[in-house]
């Protein structure tokens, strides 16, 4: 409980430190507007036109439902990847044989293109939620697994020997020594897996479902509604930025405070 109270207490200063990031977003918008002046509205609508289309979409109850469908699919697949990847990665990190045996499997999973997983999932599960969730899970799983594996394998033997020599209680060793070190590896993996999940869910929906933001993007493409397509892309990116920088980054900052 104290951990979350400290996150909330430090949140205003965290937001204040984000001025540099906000400046880079404004620079991006300026470049976007410059591109609009060169290529025109059909190829690249202006930021103003896109944001007008965005507000119209957000007022539409159907689009609100599509956003929730996509968010739900992404979070289920991402959550399963975190749960299974963390457990198996920690287990593999504890045993050298399991670590060696898992390497070729992880290489295969990393090397498999997401589009190939989508095609296979469409054959196995048909068109629907399961295909999308499976694809998100299988694309994010190896990232989390490797993070957990590296975090466990890199625990320093000297620190473990020192903790044993001082007869520290197991709870103290777990919460003050092992978990902070492991989380310093596994939490960046969570953030990378989140970005991967968000990209994959849109791609899978575009190919394998008739609802969700990916399907809405396919409709906008078929009708050449460039401003609507960019508005949907803006929703996707804004959702990812909010989850990563408003939810996950403050937690990561507190977890890694022991490094300072």
Image (cartoon, helix red, strand yellow):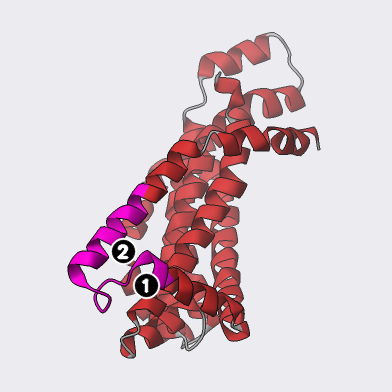
- Residue stretch in magenta: 27-50
Element type where label 2 sits in the image? loop
Magenta stretch: helix, strand or loop mostly: helix
Toward the viewer: 142 or 63? 63
Q: In which quarter of the image is the N terminus?
A: top right
Q: Percent x, y for residue 23?
A: 42, 42
Q: Quadrant of the C terminus?
A: top right
Label 1: few (<14), some or many (≥20) within 10 Å? Answer: many
The residue positioned 54% from the left and 60% from the top of the image is 78
Which of the 4 image quarters holds residue 165? Answer: top right
The residue positioned 38% from the left and 84% from the top of the image is 220
Element type where label 1 sits in the image? helix
Res. 152 in view: yes
Toward the viewer: 247 or 175? 247
Which of the 4 image quarters holds residue 30? Answer: bottom left
Question: Residue 112: which numbered mark, if any?
Answer: 2
Q: Percent x, y for residue 102?
A: 41, 49
Question: Residue 256: which numbered mark, if any?
Answer: none
Q: In this view, does 104 lie above or below 46?
A: above
- So how many labels did they put on this image? 2
207 in magenta: no
Q: In this view, does 65 lie above or below 156?
A: below
Res. 97 in view: no
Determine the CA span between mark 1 and mark 2: 7 Å
Q: Percent x, y for residue 139?
A: 42, 62
Q: Are circles 1 and 2 on residues that touch, CB within 8 Å?
A: yes
Q: Percent x, y for residue 182?
A: 56, 33
Left or right of 111, for residue 52: right
Q: Mark 1 points at which residue?
A: 117
The residue positioned 69% from the left and 28% from the top of the image is 174
Toward the viewer: 15 or 155? 15
Toward the viewer: 78 or 240? 240
């Amino acid at each position: 409980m104290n951990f979350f109270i400290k996150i909330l207490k430090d949140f205003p200063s965290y937001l204040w430190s984000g001025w540099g990031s906000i400046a880079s977003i404004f620079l991006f918008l300026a470049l976007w507007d410059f591109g609009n002046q060169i290529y025109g509205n059909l190829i690249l609508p202006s930021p103003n036109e896109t944001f007008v289309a965005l507000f119209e979409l957000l007022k539409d109850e159907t689009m609100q439902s599509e956003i929730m469908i996509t968010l739900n699919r992404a979070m289920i697949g991402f959550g399963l990847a975190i749960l299974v990847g963390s457990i198996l990665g920690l287990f593999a990190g504890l045993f050298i044989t399991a670590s060696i045996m898992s390497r070729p499997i992880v290489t295969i999973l990393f090397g498999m293109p997401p589009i190939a997983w989508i095609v296979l999932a469409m054959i196995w599960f048909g068109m629907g939620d399961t295909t999308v969730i499976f694809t998100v899970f299988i694309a994010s799983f190896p990232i989390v697994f490797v993070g957990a594996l590296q975090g466990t394998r890199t625990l320093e033997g000297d620190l473990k020997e020192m903790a044993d020599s001082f007869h520290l209680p197991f709870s103290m060793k777990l919460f003050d020594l092992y978990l902070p070190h492991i989380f310093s590896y596994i939490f960046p993996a969570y953030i990378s897996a989140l970005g991967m999940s968000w990209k994959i869910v849109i791609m899978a929906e575009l190919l394998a479902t008739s609802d969700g933001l990916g399907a809405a993007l396919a409709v906008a493409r078929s009708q050449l509604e460039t401003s609507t397509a960019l508005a949907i892309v803006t929703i996707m990116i804004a959702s990812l930025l909010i989850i990563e920088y408003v939810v996950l980054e403050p937690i990561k900052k507190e977890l890694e405070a022991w490094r300072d």
